[in-house]
Amino acid sequence: MALAPNVATSANPDAIEGQGGNIDAPQLRLFVFGLFFIFGGITSLNDVIIPKLKELFTLSFFEASLVQVWFFVAYAIIGIPGARLIKRIGYMRGAVAGLVTMIAGCFLFIPASQTAVFGLFLLAYFVLASGVVLVQVVANPLISLLGPAETTHSRLTFAQAFNSLGTTIFPYFGAILILGSLATVTAAQLSGAELDAYRTAESQAIVGGYLGIAAALAVVAAVVWLFRNRLQGEKHEDTSLAEGVALLKRPRFGYGALCIFLYVGAEVAIGSFIVNYLAQAHVLNLSDAEAGKLIPFYWGGALIGRFIGSGLLRMVSPGLLLSTVASGAIMLILISANSSGTVAGYSLLAVGLMNSIMFPTIFSLACEKLGPRAADGSGIINVAIAGGAVIPALYGLLADQIGLGLALALPAACYAVIAGFGYYARRPAEGLVENAFS
């Protein structure tokens, strides 16, 4: 099981030679940054879609969370087969395969809208997410390999900033396009043929948005295809599923994989229902469209924090910084859940700033000194992203029972575990110090 095939390094670290010509390492970094931007933006767009589908299909919070369940379960299902595909066809062709799969997912929104069937929307999200997984399989290991080991924490955090740029931009325009409907009725007031017609008409904004994304993805895929032969040959090591899973017996790695599961779950759970949370009368009392325009503050905080964090991680212990921001997230959640108005709304939005360095720092701390087993470690970490399918669903169940505010205890508990990992991993890892390249 491997998710990060080894890339041989050239004598010149700033140029990687391939049979189709040379591609400079800086050019490759820009390409990877672009991939981070794309899959980050598409993932965050779910936060805008969820309140729209919740209204169209009169869903409970748990039922609405199924959008994230079907999206993030793709990491568990597609992660390992996707890794094997990329080991066979290489990074650049793998990126194209992911982009084309994403385009197919975008086109599936057409029959989903025309039939007004919620299940088809979920299928479209699964296919779209499958493409995102393939793209992420390419992006994460590439950026970690394009530079010296001692700056991996900083480099991954800087790359994640481009992910956050996408998550900041996409929801704002998505809120205008998708949530800015002028309909004078709601799905709850209709039935039969009128309800089907309403759902079809109102979901056209969703279709239009994803068709626009599909067109942009097609351009990117065409450009990447032109460079398909310009990356030096990659050396792949075949490992079994059992050999990969065995890494979980390594305490530092097993703890880190759990934290990836919890971090993604907590971040997605808050983002998924933040429109509904802000729209509550005792918080900001906004319409869905107006609340949707505030989503960029949540993801924008992560953007700012990642640029700042990429510098801080060069000066302070990554583990202690991780523990600090996780504790900060808990504090902000407690403030939000126990207050009202502007304080309640913006303190929850500020959790995005605390999220900023978590994924890249947990990833690099967990995989530190795995050497040639880093590929297996990356595979397990990618599967752990499926926490985005589990934690939001549990949050939705809790919210249906006790309300959105009290249900924030769940993501707070996730951050508490992450704070513990940061303190645990504050010292350098031991063992498995072998050369990852040949």
Image (tube, rainbow, N blue to C red):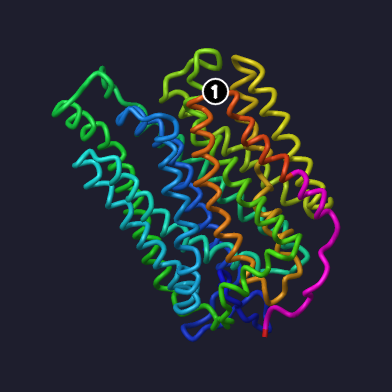
| 223, above or below 159, in the image | below
Image quarter for residue 411?
A: top right
Give the tally of numbered discs.
1
Q: Residue at x 49, y 36 (%)?
A: 272
Quadrant that contains the N terminus: bottom right
| The one of 94 and 413 positioned closer to us in this rendering | 413
Q: Is residue 433 magenta?
A: yes
Give the main secondary structure of the magenta stretch: loop
Q: Residue at x 48, y 53 (%)?
A: 39
Magenta segment boundaries in residue numbering: 419-437
Residue 52 horizontal side relative to residue 375, left or right: left
SS at badge 1: helix
Residue 121 horizontal side relative to residue 269, left or right: left
| The one of 369 and 232 positioned closer to us in this rendering | 369
| The one of 157 and 68 positioned closer to us in this rendering | 68
| 325, above or below 107, in the image | above
| 201, above or below 163, in the image | above
Q: Residues within 10 Å of mark 1 (few under 14, many from 20)?
A: few
Task: Find residue 230 and report its horizontal and vertical position in percent.
Answer: 49, 78
Image quarter for residue 383?
A: bottom right
**Residue 38 visible in the displayed image:** no
| 391, above or below 101, in the image | above
Q: Residue at x 21, y 28 (%)?
A: 198
**Residue 47 visible in the displayed image:** yes
Task: Find residue 254 and report its horizontal and vertical position in percent.
Answer: 70, 59
Q: Which residue is mark 1?
A: 402
Residue 1 horizontal side relative to residue 373, left or right: left
Task: Find residue 345 and report its horizontal and vertical position in percent.
Answer: 59, 22
Amino acid carrying label 1: it is: Ile
Quadrant that contains the C terminus: bottom right
